[in-house]
Image: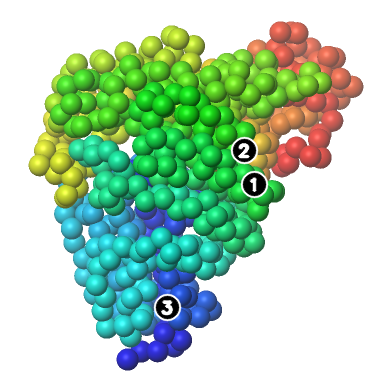
Amino acid sequence: MTDPETVDVTLVDGYVDEPAHFGVPPYVSTYPRYTAGALVDAGVPEEQITYHTIDELREDRSKWLDVEEADLMVYIGGMTVPGKYVGGTPAEPDEVRELAWTANGTSVMGGPVRFGVGEENAGATETERKNLDFDFLAMADVEAAAHDLVRSGLEGFNDRYRDVAEVDRWASMGAFVVEQHPNHPHYLIAELETSRGCAYRCSFCTEPMYGDPDFRTPPSVVSEVDALSDRGVAHFRIGRQADILAYGGDGEKPNPAALEQLYAGIREVAPDLETLHLDNMNPITVVKWPELAREGIRTIAKYNTPGDTAAFGLESADPVVQEANELNVTAEECFRAVEIVNEEAGWRPGKEPGTGPSTDVATGADAAGARSPRLPKLLPGINLLHGLDGETEETYELNKQFLERVLDEGLMLRRVNIRQVMAFEGTDMAETGASIALDHKRQFKAYKREVRETVDNPMLQRVAPVGTVLPDVHFEYHQDGRTFGRQLGTYPLLVGIPGERELGRVADVAIVDHGYRSVTGVPYPLDVNAASMDELTAIPGIGSGTAGDVLVNRPYESTADLPVDADVGLEGFATTSRSESSGSP
């Protein structure tokens, strides 16, 4: 029997994306952290646990030696919702098989991959359960499997779910593994679990497979944040739950007192945190218990950081689709929930809490009257899912009508997520499969493009008007002579900046133009005495001729001296001396 103290372990993170869980960089999911904690709890010394992401293994083949020589290799991955990613690329099935073939020791795989694997990570696909040539497939919690496997001397385990006491220990004990993440410490956001499981049973969703909601206590989550903060993490997302408003209650009814204890506790142990965002909020909770929901939303907006998003799972505005798939909220109910979140949390820093929606960036001012050009504190996002049972051409029209109503009523949505269903064994959608999604593929593409043009672009201009400042944008890649980057957070805006700047740098950026789902920005504040031609022409109202005049006549003592029209509004993001605090490269 193998002694746990002698076991060398390699954890490979192939990334996860679930209805209530992000794990593609810059996010790090709970799975590798909990698994590392479970291994330590089973007797494996911290120093004998090696963690690699799949991107690390792609970039450096020498690291495959850790996979080959480990006594135990644990693979974590699985995508149960399709997406597009910038910070990392999820492992494809063939890559996962290669891991199993390379490992000479015992190999186990787990995470949402247990729900099924398709030919590729994409929507409109069907999946089946496969072990991809691993010795073991954990059909319950991979962290419990790793713990029990080590305790058995690597001889085997019974599939089981970890209990609350175990996650209380493992969440903090496994915090050390984040230090091995290639993005640590500055470009890493830790996903936090408050619960898993769901009180509702939508046809397509894998979350109900975890059962009814099972909540961690506020002290448990707070202690995990404390441990992660001690390890250098400053960005957090409370994303691992089906409904943040139901936290600490019976799974459906809001419990504002629990939210206050959770959020206040996080702020107490991590006072210098830079991001505190969330993900899922069930709109039916908002409309069934409006006063309790308002109290909870106010609490979240009190403690969070700007730009936060509460994802609403409307899925379809078509009542036929809603009934056929047991969707729990109607379009009318969802619209009312959008109104309530806008009213309670759609205010910008410097505005009075509860005075949303703040649709004009110039209206945000602090007590002294200073301009506060930031994103609103918390806005809803809308999830729309296509390929569900009962979908017809009318479904597409009803979805567009819902979005247009939100726009016409002067409300704000942080983002609209439109995707096609993935069918997993064990869900009601397994019987329907991807047939409807495939039949409607052409219509889906045209509809998605129309929404981007007619809804996303004007909504983005409302949420992030020209002059809005996005602090701490991380530069990620170059394309077409521009540098693209994002803030850390929930559904961060993609920002394009003129010129090719050093990647990995961080800068504050002021928005000057809008695409469908991205924005153009310039360093904030922009020093017009040093700005490039491309930066100057990016400012609305400044053409190439005016920009040339600005360049020829530099330097200037004041922005008022520039040869530009007064209505350009340079005072919002320009200066005549470079600010040392702006972070501009």
Residues 124 and 256: in front is 256
Q: In the image, 261: left or right of 365?
A: left
Residue 256 at x, y = what percent?
Answer: 51, 36
Disc 3 to disc 1, C-alpha distance: 31 Å
Above or below for 46 versus 83: below
Tell me where residue 548 appears, x and y as whole percent: 73, 19
Q: Earlier in the sequence, mark 3 or mark 1?
A: 3
Identify residue for label 2. Answer: 303
Q: Mark 3 and 1 residues: CB-CB less than 8 Å, in contact?
A: no
Mark 1: amino acid? Arg
Secondary element under disc 2, as helix, strand or loop, is: helix
> How many neighbours does mark 2 have within 10 angstroms: few (below 14), some (14-19), or many (20 or more)?
some
Taking the spot 75% from the left edge, 30% from the top edge, the residue there is 525
Mark 1 touching mark 2, by CB under 8 A? Answer: yes
Q: CA distance from mark 3 to mark 2?
A: 36 Å
Residue 162 point in image, percent of width and height: 35, 64
Comes first in the chain, label 3 or label 2: 3
The residue tagged 1 is 267
Q: Is residue 167 found left or right of 331 in the rendered image?
A: right
Q: Disc 3 marks which residue?
A: 42
> Residue 386's mark?
none
- Residue at image position (72%, 14%) is 569
Rate crowding at label 3 as few (under 14), some (14 to 19) or many (20 or more) other CA atoms within 10 Å: some
Q: Which type of secondary structure does the marked residue at label 3 adopt?
A: loop
**Marked residue nearer the N-terminal end (1 or 2):** 1
Dot 2 amino acid type: Tyr
Q: Nearer the viewer, residue 419 or 322?
A: 322
Identity of the residue drawn at 59% across and 38% down: 304
Name the kind of residue labelled 3 in the image.
Ala
Residue at horizontal 49%, vertical 45%? 238
Name the spot of residue 566 as percent of width and height, x first: 75, 8
